[in-house]
Image (cartoon, helix red, strand yellow):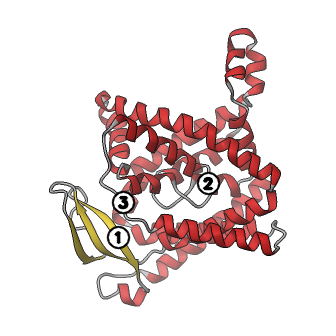
Amino acid sequence: MNIGLALKGAAMGVAEAIPGVSGGTIAFITGIYQELLETIKGITPATLRLILTDRKAFWQAINGKFLLWLLLGMGAGLVTGILVISHLLENHQILLWGFFFGLVIASAAYLAKDVKWSLISIIGAVIGGVFAYFITNLAPSAGSENPLYLFLSGCLAISALMLPGVSGSFVLLLLGLYDQIINGLKAIITDQDFSQLMPIGIFAAGAFVGLFSFARMLSYLFKKYPNNTMATMIGVLIGSLGKLWPWKKITSVYNKVTGETSALEAVKLPDNETFKILSETNLLPQQFATYDDPRTLVACFCLFAGIAVVYMLSKVAKQG
């Protein structure tokens, strides 16, 4: 049994259920990121054919023990994220974002100590930061139930999972599919509503294709340009911090019923079932206080808790 690996997978699964938090970040700070890339890269049609002729060779070729425990953990973490973290997002959003803000700050600092900084690596970090800031500030779309759109969205979302700092869930939010995918999975898990299997299956097929193609590209970059690639990843992490800032004001919303977009000045949605956030602006705690209790001390405690978690995960990673 490899409980440590399963726990790392669980942390990745929980992270991927939350818009703005990347499972790739968790893989990075727990020391399994490059092994994950190499494992995915090693799964090819040739290795899959081995299951018919030599199962032991097949198991070794796909790094089976690593993959099994990681996927078991990710599955459990994803279910936990869907059922529990969604509740925290609705009821304790400031504290949750505070925790993940600290998590990402500490992750960037932890990764930066291993980079040999040069002009090229600094430029890479700046480009990564600008890219992440731009992506995380795009307005979400209304989405679509078209099978091709679901398939391509799966490709994009899973690619984001492999990129530290860019959340697969947030990509779904940008594409207008977060509610549809999360609610579809909830319906299957809690209500045994198997009518959702078709759209979820199409999305999963896209994710499968995207996973292998993007993993190969990242694996190549880490082998050919390891230092500059790592610096760019750190920039992506830093650029995503704006999305995780705990104190936000909603400035525009999308009405799921009427299809209309309207301006709004509030820190909470009037109705989660009817409205979806299109744009927000970050506030200082004292500015937020004019709308609601900023819970500054507790949020800061959660931020430092996130930093502490990264420290503990890095210790676990060093111990294997």
**Crowding near pointer 1: few (<14 within 10 Å), some, many (20+)?**
some
Q: Are marks 1 and 2 in contact (CB under 8 Å)?
A: no
Expressed as whole percent of the image width and height from the top left, the position of residue 38 reads: 74, 40
Image quarter for residue 198?
Answer: top left
Q: Which residue is mark 2?
A: 163
- Looking at marks 1 and 2 on the same chain, the residue that comes earlier in the sequence is marked by 2
Q: Image check: 105 left or right of 140?
A: right
Tell me the SS state at disc 3.
loop
Of 28 and 98, nearer the camera is 28
Q: Is residue 242 above or below residue 46?
A: below
Expressed as whole percent of the image width and height from the top left, the position of residue 216 reads: 69, 41
- Looking at marks 2 and 3 on the same chain, the residue that comes earlier in the sequence is marked by 3
The residue drawn where x is 49% and y is 36% is: 206
Task: Quadrant for the N terminus, please.
Answer: top right
Q: Which residue is mark 1?
A: 279
The amino acid pointed to by label 3 is Pro
Q: Which residue is mark 3?
A: 140
